[in-house]
Amino acid sequence: LAKTTQPISMDSYEGQEVNITCSHNNIATNDYITWYQQFPSQGPRFIIQGYKTKVTNEVASLFIPADRKSSTLSLPRVSLSDTAVYYCLVGDTFGGKLIFGQGTELSVKP
Amino acid sequence: GAVVSQHPSWVICKSGTSVKIECRSLDFQATTMFWYRQFPKQSLMLMATSNEGSKATYEQGVEKDKFLINHASLTLSTLTVTSAHPEDSSFYICSARIAGETYEQYFGPGTRLTVT
């Protein structure tokens, strides 16, 4: 399972775009990249998943360069309610296990 | 869709007793469920993988005789913490993967265990 590295914490202000980058240098061919969000005392919530290039959904975008050794989660126009811990995970499609790294604690200020 | 519930949401027990935590997939069948433990200000730590109808696979360092996992049906997995001690106090979270589908896991809301 590929190990991931993310910044421990980030600060932002309401209305700004936030980009959180995750490094996964030893990502394997079958690995997908998935991001989860977790609020205190709650289970993680799926945000977005991708394999390569760019993926966009109603809450975020995920940018993955050609070498796939990193990925960037982009949150447009954050609000106070986006304050949470964001986890980047890498694993193969049918492997099942998700190994969580340290995550990035995002703090959005008014 | 894809809702996972846990029961109880919080529990307090005395040292030496056992406590059971249930994880249910409410609107889908889950051949595989996972159990995690999370201490304050730390990340989730995978404890074990639970497969319906077979023995759970425990991660290195997790005592299988202390953390009993049963996955008797496609919608229910249970974690029993036996002879609980204060150091077992933690936030326990389960997740489930839809049978036949790929990578996405759906997480339960977690169970806060406090051992006094």
Image (cartoon, rainbow, N blue to C red):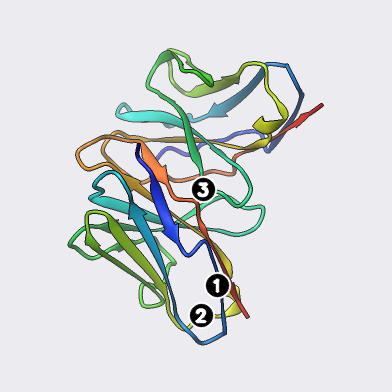
A76 displayed left or right of A58: right
Q: CA distance from mark 2 to mark 1?
A: 6 Å
Query: What residue is shown with label 1?
Result: B88
Alpha carbon distance from label 3 to label 2: 22 Å
Up-down: is A92 above or below A56?
A: below
Q: Disc 2 designates what residue?
A: B84
Tell me the crowding category of disc 1: few under 14, some 14 to 19, or many 20 or more residues within 10 angstroms, Cα based. Answer: some
Tag 3, which secondary structure? loop
* Disc 3 from disc 1: Cα separation: 18 Å
- Mark 2 is surrounded, within 10 Å at the Cα level, by few (under 14), some (14 to 19) or many (20 or more) other residues, namely many
Residue at the image position 48 percent from the left and 65 percent from the top: B8
Mark 3 lies on residue? A43
Q: Amino acid at mark 1?
A: Asp
Q: Quadrant of residue B39?
A: bottom right
Q: What's the amino acid at mark 3?
A: Gly
- Viewer-proximal residue among B105 and B5: B5
- The image shows residue B13 at horizontal and vertical percentages of 55, 79
Residue B81 image position (x, y, % from top left): 44, 74
Pick the quarter of the image with the N terminus of chain A.
top left
The chain to which mark 1 is attached is B
Circle number at residue B23:
none
Quarter of the figure with the C terminus of chain A:
top right
